[in-house]
Amino acid sequence: MTVRNIGWLMIVLALVAAFLCGCGTTGDITNHRASFLFDNALTRTMNGLSYNMSDDRFEGIVKRCAVNGDTAIYLYFSNQGDGTPVPTSFYENDKFGGEIDDHRLKDMQERVQFCQLNGLRVVAWLFADDSSKISKAPLEVQQKYIDDVVREFDRYISEYVLGLEMDEHMKSRMEPLAVFLDSKTAKKIGLHLRPGRWTYSRDIEAVDHHYHQFGFNKPASFIESETAKIKALVGKPVIAAEYDLNSDSPAAKARGAAAINGGAAGTGNGR
């Protein structure tokens, strides 16, 4: 079954069944397991909502995540130039914060629901790096985009992350956007920073979860000790988000397990 042929009846029946069995597809992620990088980072789940990714390619990535034991999937909701394929946009002519393209919006909503039908809760990453037009847009335009995402997708989303490496390209916007997002949704909000950084996650009250980047090819012992240290420093749940380029490799699984042993609330590169 392709994404475009899911059918609204099937979606409704699946969501009703999930509700009745107590295993809803949104809300807090109690067993946070994601695999956002595969194939030496050549395959990235985050680009899955790009209209330049085929349905077959998208479905294959979703099913690969499910086979890897994942319970969550990381997806960009806007992206100009990070990874491939690009762009990701539900706006007409890719004009960030402009008029919504109903066709693109429907396609993105159906892909998000396809993830849910395959047992994956959605973690929405709002801003990508390497996307200067989006990163440098006026604050009110960025807020309008957040408002659009919450209005059109919040019912499908389990958790938000403001963006990738936010301290690199949107440092002055992190707190106002986190506060704005917090005023629009009851879902948890995460913050992802450059390798080893954590202070903004601690200091911004609207941030609930710190998504930590460890750097790649680190020994499992480092991942475990670093997780314990960061958890104590931040004082909030830590998601071990980025530590391996091949999320289904034995090394990635060992690093993910080490993060959990160190007290992580979840993992983003396999376990």
Image: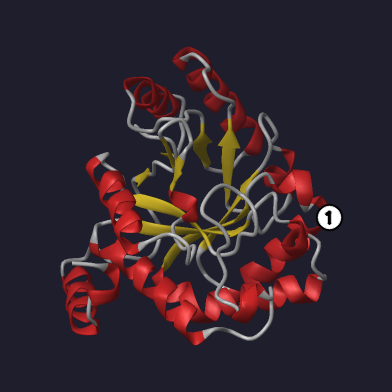
Q: Between 86 and 264, which is closer to the camera in this rendering? A: 86
Give the x, y percent position of residue 127.
64, 58
Q: Picture quarter containing residue 122?
A: bottom left
Residue kind at label 1, given as amino acid type:
Ser
What residue do we see at 39% from left, 64% from top?
A: 27
Q: Picture quarter containing residue 136?
A: bottom right
| 204 on left or right of 151 | right
Q: Between 186 and 128, which is closer to the camera in this rendering? A: 128
In the picture shown, does residue 132 fall above or below 225? Answer: below
What residue do we see at 32% from left, 69% from top?
A: 113
Number of marks present in the image shown: 1
Identify the coloring.
secondary structure
- Circle 1 residue: 172
| 248 on left or right of 199 | left
| 186 on left or right of 202 | left
Image quarter where the N terminus lies is bottom left
Q: Residues within 10 Å of mark 1 (few under 14, many from 20)?
A: few
